[in-house]
C-alpha cells in the first residue's frame, strides 16, 4: 500500500523548479546533512537540488570507533557510496569533539583517566584510520568541533580533551589529519560563530594556530540561525573577520529555526503564513549577503534538507516540531526557496 504521503512524494519526481545547486553554481556548493534514513526518504530531493553531503552523525567518533580498535564503518560507507552514486562531493564531520565521543577514549581498562601521551596516540590512530579510509570520498574535514567557550572570557571549553591533553590537542588533530590526507581541506567548526564575543574568540584561536604553522585551511560557520538572530550586520562582521585570516569559509550546518533560541513555546503545530514569509525574507537577505562573499565562501551546507526531518524537532525543546529548511515536509519548495530562485546568476 502506498500512503498518501508517498504518492505525493513520487509525483514530485517531476520537478519543474530550478535546482538549488544550479542557482548558486557560480557561487558555492550546496550541501545537506544526511543519515541512513534520509538518503532513502529524501533521495529524489537530495539528488535534484544538492551537490554535497555531510554525514549527520555517522562519522562522529562514537559512531566510527565504539570500542577501542573496533571500527564500525557500515553506515558511513553507505553515505559515501550515496555521494558517489549521485556525483556529489562529501564533507567529513567530525574528528575531535567533546560530544558523541565514547567513554573508553579517555580511560584505561580499569576506568582510570589516561595520560596525555596515550590520549594523543588514540587520537592519532583514529584520525589516520578514518581520514585515510575516506581519502577518495571526502575532500574536507571538520577536524575540531566546538572547542571555544560560549560564556565569559575563557577561550577554550572545559572538556576531557583539554583536561588530559591541554590546548595542544587542537594543533595535533590538524597535524594528524594533514598527515593522513595532505589534500584534504581542514576546518575548525563552531556554532554561535556570528555572536561578536564568540566570533572574536574563534578568530583568536585560529590566528594562533596559523602562527604555529598548523595545517588549517578553513573556518566552518555552523550557522544554526533563526528567523530573528543573528543580525545581517553580525553575520557580515563575522564573515569579514574570518576572511581576514586568508582562509576559506563554509557554512557547514545552516538552518533557520522558527523560534528564538530561548523561546520555549510548544503550541505551534504548523508555521503561519507570516512566519513562512519572515523566513523567506531572512533566507533571501542572507543568501544575497553570502553571494557578496562568493570568493571566500566555498560551500553552504544545510543541516538537513526538508522539514520532515530536522534535529531541531527535538532541540532545545524536546518533541517540538520546527520548520527550518527551504523544502516542506513533503519536499515541496517553500516561499523561501522561490525567493532564492531570483538570485540565480544571469
Ligand atoms: C551541532 N552542534 C553539531 O556540530 C552537530 O554535529 C550536531 O548534529 C548538531 C549540531 C550545535 C550546538 C548548538 O547549536 C547548541 C548547543 C550545542 C551544540
Image (cartoon, rainbow, N blue to C red):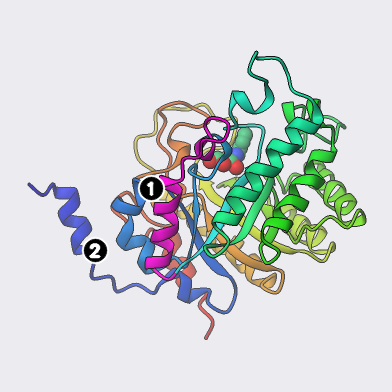
Is residue 342 at least partly visible in the picture?
Answer: no
Could you tell me which residue is drawn at 60 percent across and 48 percent down? 129
Depicted 96 relative to depicted 27: above or below? above
Say left or right for 327 vs 175. Answer: left
In this figure, which residue is indicated by the disc labeled 1?
307
> 232 or 193: which is nearer to us?
193
Give the x, y percent position of residue 232: 68, 56
Element type where label 1 sits in the image? loop
Left or right, 193 with respect to 245, comes to left
Question: Taking the image as four quarters, which one is ligand 1 found in?
Answer: top right
Of 308 and 259, which appears nearest the observer? 308
Q: Residue at x 55, y 69 (%)?
A: 29
In the displayed orientation, state which residue is furthest to the left: 1
The label number, if any, that marks residue 152 in the structure image: none
The residue depicted at 66 percent of the width and 37 percent of the height is: 97
Q: Is residue 78 magenta?
A: yes
Q: Which residue is mark 2?
A: 12
Residue 223 in picture, x, y percent from top left: 62, 50
Q: Is residue 123 magenta?
A: no
Could you tell me residue 128's position as x and y percent?
A: 65, 50
Q: Residue at x 34, y 35 (%)?
A: 269
Q: Determine whether the beta carbon of the residue marked 2 sits less than 8 angstroms from the nearest atom of ligand 1.
A: no
- Could one spot residue 133 in this view of the protein? yes
Task: Point out residue 271 in the picture as x, y percentages from the top left corner.
Answer: 39, 43
Magenta stretch in the rendered image: 63-87
Depth check, front residue: 50 or 337: 50
Amino acid at each position: 500500500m502506498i500512503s498518501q504521503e508517498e504518492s505525493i512524494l513520487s509525483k514530485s519526481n517531476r520537478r519543474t523548479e530550478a535546482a538549488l545547486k544550479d542557482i548558486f553554481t557560480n557561487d558555492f556548493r550546496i550541501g545537506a546533512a544526511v543519515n541512513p534514513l534520509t538518503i532513502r526518504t529524501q533521495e529524489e530531493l537530495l539528488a535534484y537540488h544538492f551537490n554535497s553531503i555531510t554525514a549527520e552523525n555517522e562519522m562522529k567518533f562514537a559512531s566510527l570507533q565504539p570500542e577501542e580498535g573496533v571500527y564500525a564503518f557500515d553506515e558511513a560507507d553507505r553515505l559515501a557510496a550515496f555521494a558517489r552514486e549521485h556525483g556529489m562531493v562529501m564533507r567529513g564531520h567530525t574528528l575531535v569533539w567533546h560530544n558523541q565521543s565514547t567513554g573508553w577514549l579517555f580511560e584505561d581498562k580499569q576506568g582510570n583517566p589516561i595520560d596525555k601521551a596515550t590520549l594523543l596516540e588514540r587520537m592519532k590512530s583514529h584520525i589516520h584510520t578514518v581520514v585515510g579510509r575516506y581519502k577518495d570520498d571526502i575532500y574536507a574535514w571538520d577536524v575540531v568541533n566546538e572547542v571555544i567557550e560560549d560564556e565569559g572570557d575563557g577561550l577554550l571549553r572545559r572538556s576531557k580533551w583539554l583536561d588530559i591533553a591541554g590546548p595542544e590537542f587542537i594543533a595535533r588533530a590538524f597535524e594528524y589529519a594533514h598527515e593522513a590526507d595532505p589534500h584534504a581541506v581542514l576546518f575548525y567548526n563552531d556554532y554561535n560563530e556570528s555572536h561578536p564575543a564568540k566570533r572574536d574568540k574563534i578568530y583568536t584561536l585560529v590566528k594562533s594556530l596559523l602562527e604555529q604553522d598548523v595545517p588549517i585551511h578553513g573556518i566552518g560557520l555552523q550557522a544554526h540561525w533563526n528567523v530573528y538572530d543573528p543580525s545581517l550586520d553580525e553575520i557580515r562582521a563575522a564573515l569579514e573577520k574570518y576572511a581576514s585570516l586568508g582562509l576559506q569559509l563554509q557554512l557547514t550546518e545552516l538552518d533557520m529555526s522558527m523560534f528564538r533560541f530561548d523561546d520555549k513555546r510548544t503550541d505551534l503545530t504548523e508555521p503561519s503564513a507570516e512566519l513562512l514569509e519572515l523566513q523567506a525574507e531572512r533566507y533571501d537577505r542572507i543568501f544575497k549577503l553570502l553571494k557578496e562573499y562568493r570568493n571566500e565562501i566555498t560551500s553552504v551546507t544545510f543541516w538537513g534538507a526538508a522539514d520532515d526531518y530536522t534535529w531541531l524537532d527535538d532541540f532545545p525543546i524536546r518533541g517540538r516540531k520546527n520548520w527550518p529548511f527551504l523544502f516542506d515536509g513533503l519536499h515541496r519548495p517553500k516561499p523561501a526557496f522561490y525567493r532564492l530562485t531570483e538570485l540565480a546568476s544571469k
